[in-house]
Amino acid sequence: MNLFDATEGNYRVVRTVTFPDFPDSELVLNVEVTAISPSEWITEMTINGTYDGPTDFVSQKDYQLDWATDGKSLIESGSATLESASGEAVRSTWSSVITPQGGLEGFPAAGELVTVSISPFQVDGDSMSYEWEGTVQERSMAP
């Protein structure tokens, strides 16, 4: 089950992002997503916090994501390494609570593991694009 299937594309996210190599940096994202169609979503985001590392990111690697549920929300934890144009690697970790406007009917109680491959970023003025490919796999329940 992917995020669209679990939420029908309508959800709120509160995400805290930390950067282990920059301990004074922490960002809190408050996000609301509304689906217009299965392939088009409107996203409104407010970002608060501080960040004192490089900002010239061109790609990321080692993207890992884990979803669990408390029955009402998805509890997400993840990490990725951001790569700057100068070659500096910046580790990032995050935790999120994703709350769908509806319920989480059909989401596996054991949660899911998500594996994603993301292409280098393409930056053109004020816009950024990238390609990604991922798989979502149900986490097995411990006996």
Image (cartoon, grey):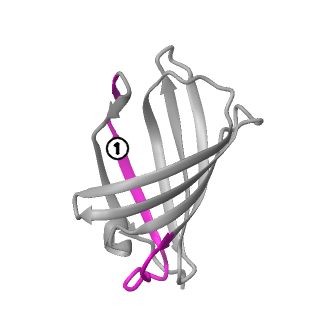
Q: Position of residue 51 (x, y in %)?
A: 67, 33
The answer to whether any part of residue 2 appears in the image is no
Residue positioned 32% across, 67% down in the render: 4
124 vs 113: above or below = above
Give left or right: position of 4 versus 90.
left
Q: Quadrant of the C terminus?
A: bottom right
Residues 16 and 60: in front is: 16
Residues 23 and 142: in front is: 23
Give left or right: position of 91 versus 126.
right
Q: Which residues are magenta?
A: 99-124
Residues 95 and 139: in front is: 95
Residue positioned 37% across, 84% down in the render: 106
Residue positioned 56% across, 26% down in the render: 89
136 vs 69: above or below = above
58 vs 47: above or below = above
Q: Is residue 2 magenta?
A: no
Q: Residue furthest top?
A: 86
The answer to whether any part of residue 22 appears in the image is yes
Q: Position of residue 43 (x, y in %)?
A: 40, 54
Find numbered disc 1 in the image and state the secondary structure of the residue it sits on: strand
Q: Is residue 104 magenta?
A: yes
Q: Position of residue 26 (x, y in %)?
A: 69, 42
Residue positioned 34% across, 67% down in the render: 9
Give left or right: position of 15 versus 85.
right
Q: Residue furthest right?
A: 24
Query: Mark 1 belongs to which amino acid?
Result: Ser
**Residue denoted by label 1:** 117
60 vs 41: above or below = above
Q: Quadrant of the N terminus?
A: bottom left
Q: Position of residue 114 (x, y in %)?
A: 41, 59
